Image: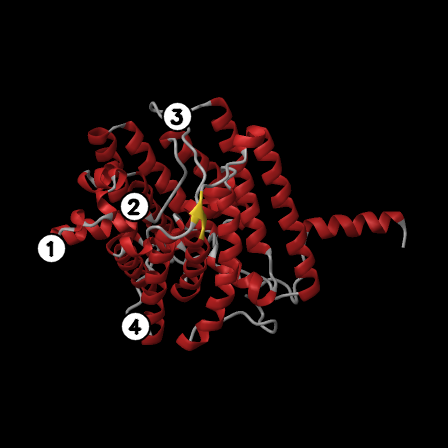
Amino acid sequence: MSATTDKLSARDFLLRSPTSCAAPQPAPEEPVRAAPLVIAGALAVGLSWYVWAVHGQRFGALLIIGLFLGVALFHSRFGFTSAWRQLISVGNGDGLRAHTLLIGTATTLIALIAASGAGLFGAGPDLSAGSIGLPLFLGAAVFAIGMQLGGACASGTLFAVGAGQSTIVLTLGGFIVGSVFYTWAFPAFDGWPEVEGVLLSDHVGWFGSWAITIVALLAIVVVTRVVQARRTPPPVGAVPTARGFARVFRGSWPMLAGAVVLGVLAAAVVLVSGGIWGVTTAFALWGAKLLQLFGLHPETWEFWQQSRYATMLEGPIWTEKTSLTNIGIILGAAVAASLAGTWKIRAEIPWRTALAAVLGGILMGIGARMAGGCNIGAYLGGISTGSLHGWLWGLFALGGTWLGLKLRPLFGLATPKPTDSAC
């Protein structure tokens, strides 16, 4: 074999990965769904104006960032649950490689923000390491099992609900229930063995932290390409899309394009708030406030008596970061799905699917609180800020994914097979 052929083979290896057949062609987009578009658009504009005018620029900006997150998540169908499922079940690493681009983009921008001390609306970067120990390991695995049963991760749950996916509404309900259960049972979880986390920048500076993270992400790209070359899995399925420029507003984006946009927006959350993008704290807060509406008193629970959480529970959700971005994601995804013509409510849900959705949500709610975060707050946020706990969360989540895939058939849920035409 010539040197030129060797170079071409290496280039092909770096740029593409083999699949068992050609990727399916996407179907044309459906007509715009006018009614949900008008409702979601009006809510998005009205709430953004209200929060900005009444509660301040920082909180208004966070809601607007959430809207863009919802649009990007929907259009790229950016999946954490599906990416791990495809990798573990058939060896397709496209999704996980998109994760590395997302994390790499966020890592680069967050390192620049942290090193320069930049911030907007009076915020400055305040980044810390997550604790490492049994709660992290078990929580990440439990969360991943819940993802595979519930059909979505934390961010995926939000944009799927916004897009009108009825089953995932049940997942969100379970997510809130599981989060509230953890806050009620907090004394039973408190005190499990763990040690202080490790922030790479404390030891090698922000440039060193960035370099180590990027090298590790590139290694993941290489490993997943080797795995995919050996297993030759089915390609990832296609979703309906417009063509040409209209694809920006009415189509599916390439997942890698979505990864870059989401990485920029994750860094924007840090720039505006000083902290990482998170999701699941809001679910515990929403559940606690709902209990208060019914005359119950979660504020007497030990969890909500901690200073940070007591302040959060006493204040409005319009000044709580994760609530703002979460609401923005739901509304942004609703606008995007309506424009794409895919927003619809499914009236009939098989009982086993419904049970899996609720159970999966409960497990994710408990797991996220145990681990101190989810696929966004712990995995993306941890790795992109150079915290070792983010890598460990991902490792144990892969193990939980394997267990979750073993449980899916019990609920009539499909798992990709090597003989499928798409995964």
User: Contact (CB < 8 A) between labels 3 and 1?
Assistant: no
Name the residue type under label 4. Glu
Residue drawn at x 44%, y 72% is 408
Query: Which mark's residue is nearer the viewer, 1 or 4?
Result: 1
> Which of the numbered marks, if any, corresponds to residue 124?
3
Numbered disc 4: secondary structure? loop
First in sequence: mark 3 vs mark 4: 3
Name the residue type under label 1. Phe
Query: Of residues 180 and 4, which is closer to you in this image?
Result: 180
Query: Which mark's residue is nearer the viewer, 4 or 2?
Result: 2
Image x and y of residue 118, in percent: 44, 23
Numbered disc 2: secondary structure? helix
**Horizontal arrangement in the rendering, residue 193 relative to residue 56 (left or right):** right
Query: Of residues 258 and 372, which is closer to you in this image?
Result: 372
In this view, 170 is above or below 3: below
Image x and y of residue 175, in percent: 31, 58
Q: Can residue 250 be seen by looking at this rendering?
A: no
> Which of the numbered marks, if any, corresponds to residue 294?
1
CA gap between label 1 and label 2 equals: 22 Å
Image x and y of residue 354, in percent: 32, 70
Numbered disc 1: secondary structure? loop
**Horizontal arrangement in the rendering, residue 357 relative to residue 245 (left or right):** left
Residue carrying label 4: 348
First in sequence: mark 2 vs mark 3: 3
First in sequence: mark 4 vs mark 2: 2
> Which of the numbered marks, if any, corresponds to residue 327?
2
Name the residue type under label 3. Gly
Give the total number of marks visible in the rendering.
Answer: 4
> Which of the numbered marks, if any, corresponds to residue 338?
none
